[in-house]
Image (cartoon, helix red, strand yellow):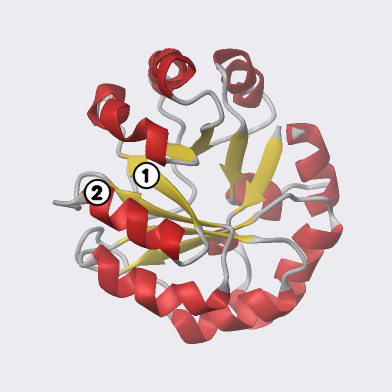
Amino acid sequence: MLVAPSILSADFGRLAEDVKAVCDGGCDLVHVDVMDGHFVPNLTIGPVVVDAVAKAATKPLDIHLMVENNSFFVDLFAPLNPEFISFHIEEEKHPHRLIQKIRSLGIRPSIVLNPHTLPESVEFLLEDLDMVLLMSVNPGFGGQKFIPSVIEKVQRLKALIEKRNPDCLIEVDGGVNDVNVKQLAAAGVDVVVAGSYVYKHPKGVKEAIASLK
């Protein structure tokens, strides 16, 4: 299991230290939630802050766009050389075109599905994707409870991926902990995003990351 701690749950007063802590603690990716206050009812961070995260991180960035006007934000964050940029299928009129643009910038493209969005909505895009991110909470805020129906959704997506593009990863974001991670792994998840669980773990971030792995 690859682990991508979400900096949404970090202490922004000591962001560089918190980013270094998860990198030193054994994470695989650093998950960056970008929210514009339009697509979701929250406003988070822009390229100046993410640039600081990139400088502090020793692991690749996993940027999750929760925005309107995806192409504009891809252009903003591409210079930071993230490993992945994920965008929401619900917001994008021309997803195939945006996937091609992300890949042309040397970044691995990923699509995000909200809890209500069917996995079949990306079936004919899978051959061009490196990852699909399934939200297991409603996007916009950290610390929410895991929606159990995502387990069945993972299984349906996994069947489509095996048929269309076995190399495509499945990532799940929202309410992940050391209990439900076992169900997620069994269903076929490759990457988990965890914010509150990692940064608020009583034994520290290293122990939290190890328990998810």
The percent coordinates of residue 99 (x first, y second) are 34, 52
Q: Which residue is mark 1?
A: 111
Which three-letter amino acid code belongs to the residue tagged 2? Pro
**Residue 18, above or below 155:** below
Q: Which residue is denoted by mark 2 in the rendering? A: 95
Q: Compared with residue 155, is residue 117 higher up or lower down, i.e. above or below?
A: below
In primary-sequence order, the first of circles 2 and 1 is 2
- Relative to the observer, which residue lies in front, 53 or 138? 53
Is residue 156 in view? Answer: yes
Which amino acid is tagged 1? Ile
Camera-side mark, 2 or 1:
2
**Crowd around label 1: few <14 · some 14–19 · many ≥20 (10 Å):** many
**Mark 2 vs 1: CB contact within 8 A:** yes
The front one of 10 and 60 is: 60
Q: Quadrant of the C terminus?
A: top right
Residue 101, image x, y percentages: 35, 61
Residue at horizontal 46 percent and vertical 81 percent from the top: 47
- Residue in the image at 27% along x and 67% along y: 71
Lateral position of residue 188 relative to residue 24, left or right: left
The answer, for residue 204, to whether it is visible in the render is: no
Q: Provide residue 194's location: percent of width, then percent of height.
A: 60, 45
56, above or below 138, in the image: below
In the image, farthest residue toward the front: 104
Separation of marks 2 and 1 at Cα, in angstroms:
8 Å
